Amino acid sequence: MAETTGAVLPKGFRSAELGWPELHRIPRPPYRLPLVGDVIGANVRSPLQDSMRFGRRLGPIFRRKGFGKEIVFVWGAELAAELADETRFAKHVGLGVANLRPVAGDGLFTAYNHEPNWQLAHDVLAPGFSREAMEGYHPMMLAVAERLMDRWDGERAAGRAVDVPGDMTKLTLETIARTGFGHDFGSFERSRPHPFVTAMVGTLTYAQRLNVLPAPLAPVLLREATRRNEAHMAYLNQTVDAVVAARRHSSGEGDLLDRMLETAHPDTGERLTPENIRRQVITFLIAGHETTSGALSFALHYLAQHPDVAARARAEVDRVWGDTPLPAYDQVAKLRYVRRVLDESLRLWPTAPAFAREAREDTVLGGVHPMRTGAWTLVLTALLHRNPEVWGADAEEFDPDRFDPGAVRSRAAHTFKPFGTGARACIGRQFALHEATLVLGLLLRRYELRPEPDYRLRVAERLTLMPEGLRLHLDDRAPAPDPVSLRPVARAGD
């Protein structure tokens, strides 16, 4: 059944005092100024990292206020576990997520709980992430990975460092575009980012900026940015409309777009409308590549910074894949230590760093804090994942062995949430994990990764997280297996 919470709730931002009757019991920063709120020491470019800093000082539940917007944050393990209870809480679409609705509408990620297209799209598209479907995507993932490695081979031969975030964005955009929609953006043949990426980053950054500005002043302060955002949204819509139109005049291969166009709900017979199809394609193209590119970029950063971890992961790839030039679908899941590297990177920097939950009915959080129906809070995943009570005194350190099976079994549930929680958790998480594990395995087998000596991790925020300015040097490995072409799958349009 579709979730019904929200059907009678107002849309738009709801400040905390409207839903938390005893808000005064929740800690806040000490220096609150009239009108502007808790802005002392704040950085509008890094609101997530600001909140992490405040959270460490104020405790597992705290609040911040800026320009009339007050938000309750949670990062304590017990409180986060309570908020994961689907009988009491549901996804809340607010803050930057709601700011994306002008372009993503009632897509899977941005739909309100009461909007019927969420459940319809979920039921129609869920088979697109089955094991059978994933096996069908695997050869295309390999083909796109070779395009990345061709590029990196050229940079290595020229003695140049590689732009990790830029190239991971190209990789993951091409992967979701080809596997999901039969489209080739030609990202690796471009010297600059594809205009779709520029437009996507622009809309995400604009949504982030709306979060931290006073609503009455935003139209004035962001007049030029608003104009650019409208142009970016128009480009995203035009691009997707062209992809859909091309498919309507050709036969697909049973991918996500085919399912959207041809599949009716198994019980009701309903179909997705053309407008909703556009919104779902935009959702998948953005969410399907932006978070995965960040996860890969952080993982490569940590592998370069920890050569002992990289050596252990590389040894596993050599042992599990042997001299197989084209690892099979089943061989990817056997890279258990590589997967731990990925999970530990997502622990430290979950690229979707928070998720919001709202009360389905009047309740009391933690037995202390009353919440009215519709009251919401933001779970800081990035701080939950660093909670020393869960992860130990060295929670800030990178250690993939935290995800050894024994260690995982010993931890409480709901303490690792890089893909959100509940019925509205990321539908494509297995796709993303398979793709990222495969790519890390291929890159470890082919290259030694060396960081630039003076680089210090800086994290860029645009709703999602990405390491900023990360470049790595590539060194030759010992002779690898004779590479067989990874391009047996024709590109769209060939």
Image (cartoon, rainbow, N blue to C red):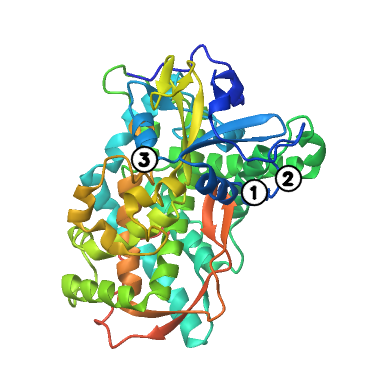
Q: Are marks 1 and 2 in contact (CB under 8 Å)?
A: yes
Residue 433 in view, yes or no: yes
Gap between marks 1 and 3 measured at Cα: 34 Å
Q: Position of 405 compared to 422: left or right?
A: left
Q: How far from the left and from the top, in percent, is residue 144?
A: 39, 63
Q: Is residue 288 above or below residue 435?
A: above
Q: Amino acid at mark 1?
A: Gly
- As helix, strand or loop, the secondary structure at mark 3 comes to helix
Give whichever of discs 1 and 2 has the lower sequence position. 1
Question: Can residue 492 be seen in the rendering of this structure?
Answer: no
- Residue at the spot x=36%, y=38% of the render? 258
Name which residue lies at 71% across and 43% down: 39
Identify which amino acid the numbered label 2 is placed on: Arg
In the image, 6 versus 102, the foreground residue is 6
Distance from disc 2 to disc 3, alpha carbons, whole Å, reads 40 Å
Q: Name the mark nearer the viewer: 1 or 3.
A: 3
Q: Position of residue 423 (x, y in %)?
A: 34, 30
On the image, the x and y values in percent for residue 321 come to 19, 71
Please identify the quarter of the rendering in which residue 220 is found: top right
Q: Residues within 10 Å of mark 3 (few under 14, many from 20)?
A: many
Q: Tell me the amino acid under the disc marked 3.
A: Ala
Residue pointed to by mark 1: 202
Residue position for label 3:
77
SS at circle 1: helix
Q: Seen from this angle, which residue lies furthest top? A: 8
The numbered disc on residue 228 is 2
